[in-house]
Each structure stands twice: as C-alpha cells, then as structure tokens.
Amino acid sequence: VQLQASGGGLVQAGGSLIVSCVASGRTFSSYGMGWFRQAPGKEREFVAAISWSGGRTYYADSVKGRFTISRVNAKNTVYLQMNSLKPDDTAVYSCAATQLGCSDYGCPTHIYDYMYWGQGTQVTVSS
C-alpha cells in the first residue's frame, strides 16, 4: 500500500483545516488507518485512528473533541478534519496503515503497529 498525504498549510489559531491521505491498491478497505504527527525536536505521536470499516475511531486526548477522522473506502481516502487549531498542533502530519483491528478499548496507537506510511504534510498554526 502506498500512501500520499496532502492538504496541509498555514492557518491561524482557532481555524480549521482538513488533511487527506489517498492510498494506492485495491485492498485499502482491509486496513485500519491512523494519523500521526511530528513536531520539530519531538517524537512522532499518535493523533487518531479509524477501523477498516470506519465504524470505530480513537483519538489522542490532546485532539479529542477538536479533530475528526473519517474514511471513504470507495475513494481509497482517509481524512482528518482539524478544528479549533492551536499553535501546539503545528507538525508534519502523516497517515499510516495497519492490519491490526480496533476493539471496544481503542485502536492501534503505536508507530510499530503500522506497517505502511505516507510522506507527511506540514500543518502550521500561527498564534
């Protein structure tokens, strides 16, 4: 699976942005998807995940209530809608695919749970 993220940019604090990730191949619907981000000088961190069907989602506490992950399997695309953005949200956002499923307790959140990665898109939030 090859992943291509896009949609990043510069936005003012309090604003909104949506980033997308398009996957190649015909097996997209069999993978769980996640979004991660990495700010300068910091480790990559989990942001959000969604099950293969879209029926289950899971969020980091830092973005819960502000970000929404969704997917359209017919378009091989996963989205991350980001609202009420803060300067701390500034990072390179990357999408990733996993063969692990979600449960009632959550979805995969560790980078080692994901086997395919996109190149990332820069999101910058100005204060």
Image (cartoon, rainbow, N blue to C red):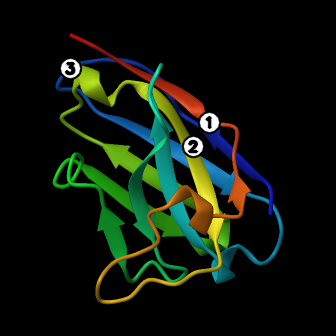
Q: In terms of sequence position, does the residue under pointer 1 or pointer 2 come before the other?
A: 2
Reading the image, the residue beneath label 1 is 120
User: Residue, x 71% and y 64% (percent of image)?
Assistant: 115
Which quarter of the figure is the C terminus placed in? top left
| In the image: residue 46, left or right of residue 23 | left
Residue furthest out toward the bottom = 104
* Image height of 74 relative to 65, above or below: below
Quarter of image, res 23 = bottom right
Disc number lying in front (2 or 3): 2
User: Element type at marker 1?
Assistant: loop
Mark number displayed over residue 93:
none
- The amino acid sitting under disc 3 is Ala
Q: Circle 2: is it few (<14), some (14-19), or many (20+) Cα within 10 Å? A: many
User: Residue, x 70% and y 38% (percent of image)?
Assistant: 119
Mark number displayed over residue 94:
2
Q: CA distance from mark 3 to mark 1?
A: 21 Å
Q: In terms of sequence position, does the residue under pointer 2 or pointer 3 come before the other?
A: 3
User: Element type at marker 3?
Assistant: loop
Quarter of image, res 121 = top right
Reading the image, the residue beneath label 3 is 13
Of the pair 33 and 26, the residue shown nearer to us: 33
Which quarter of the figure is the N terminus placed in? bottom right
Q: Dots 1 and 2: beta carbons under 8 Å?
A: yes
* Image height of 84 relative to 81, above or below: above
| In the image: residue 31, left or right of residue 92 | right
Q: CA distance from mark 2 to mark 3?
A: 21 Å
Q: Circle 1: is it few (<14), some (14-19), or many (20+) Cα within 10 Å? A: many
- The amino acid sitting under disc 2 is Ser
* Image height of 67 relative to 116, above or below: above
Disc number lying in front (3 or 1): 1
Q: Circle 3: is it few (<14), some (14-19), or many (20+) Cα within 10 Å? A: some
